[in-house]
Image: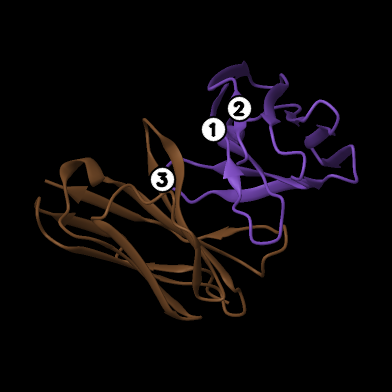
Chain colours: A purple, B brown
Amino acid sequence: GENVEQHPSTLSVQEGDSAVIKCTYSDSASNYFPWYKQELGKRPQLIIDIRSNVGEKKDQRIAVTLNKTAKHFSLHITETQPEDSAVYFCAADSGGYQKVTFGIGTKLQVIP
Amino acid sequence: DAGVIQSPRHEVTEMGQEVTLRCKPISGHNSLFWYRQTMMRGLELLIYFNNNVPIDDSGMPEDRFSAKMPNASFSTLKIQPSEPRDSAVYFCASRSGPGANEQFFGPGTRLTVL
């Protein structure tokens, strides 16, 4: 089955700096890679996703890159703000009737 | 649409009691997932359904856990008997079909077993 590894597990950055979270996956059949943000006491919510036919996708201050050959993908947050503080989960999905596999999560703290 | 609905939002029970968690997926979604979240183990997939049929229950921790989806708009996760180590937040999520798409999570049920 699919195995998703995520690191770092915790990350502290100063407000305004950039944050990068990295994930690797094992199943070459995976073709959809969503990122979820979970604020304290709230539910995980999708913030950005990328499909395997695309190498990079950007939405304002957040971007995701995908390297299919190396089987890794990353989340980049620029100009971080205190409201970016949350736990971020990456996931890998091969579609069909396969389950989605989540990473362990990264707790991001943005220090004002 | 109200999104994924879960009930109860909080449950406190004593060890040995039966616990039933409920979920109503988004209308039209035909994939439903049950997750358990703890500090130690993160977000764990317990079981998921497609078109009301359980596809993979390999994440169900033991026989004390069971899940049903009698129709497209309702699912339950039951723990009998409950134990203190079952204390966690349980999330239900739904997705529109078996394709690779966003999952929409419910608000979760915070379970405390004393």
Q: Where does residue A75 sit, x and y in percent of width and height?
A: 73, 32
Query: Which chain letter matches label 1?
Result: A
Give above or below for B17 relative to B85.
below
- Of callouts 3 and 1, which one flags the residue occurring earlier in the amino acid sequence? 3
Using the numbered discs, state the Cα–Cα distance from disc 1 to disc 2 in whole angstroms. Answer: 7 Å
- Which image quadrant is residue A52 in? top right
For marks 3 and 1, give the one nearer the viewer: 1
Using the numbered discs, state the Cα–Cα distance from disc 3 to disc 2 in whole angstroms. Answer: 21 Å
For marks 3 and 2, give the one nearer the viewer: 2
Using the numbered discs, state the Cα–Cα distance from disc 3 to disc 1 in whole angstroms. Answer: 15 Å
Query: Which chain letter matches label 3?
Result: A
- Asked if residue B86 lies left or right of residue B38, the reply is left
Which residue is located at x 69 percent, y 33 percent?
A: A26
Give above or below for B109 relative to A74.
below
Please give the residue where the numbered disc 3 appears in the rendered image: A41
Q: Nearer the viewer, residue B43 or B53?
A: B53
Please give the residue where the numbered disc 1 appears in the rendered image: A105
Q: Nearer the viewer, residue B46 or B96?
A: B46
Give above or below for A65 relative to A97.
above
> Which numbered disc covers residue B10?
none
Q: Residue furthest bottom?
A: B71
Q: Where does residue A83 sit, x and y in percent of width and height?
A: 59, 36
Which residue is located at x 54 percent, y 48 percent?
A: A44
- Asked if residue B79 lies left or right of residue B69, the reply is left
Please give the residue where the numbered disc 2 appears in the rendered image: A6
> Counting other residues with Cα less than 10 Å from the Cα at mark 3, is it few (<14), some (14-19), or many (20 or more)?
few
Which residue is located at x 76 percent, y 27 percent?
A: A78
Q: Are marks 1 and 2 in contact (CB under 8 Å)?
A: yes
Whether discs 3 and 1 lie on one chain: the answer is yes
Q: Amino acid at mark 3?
A: Gly
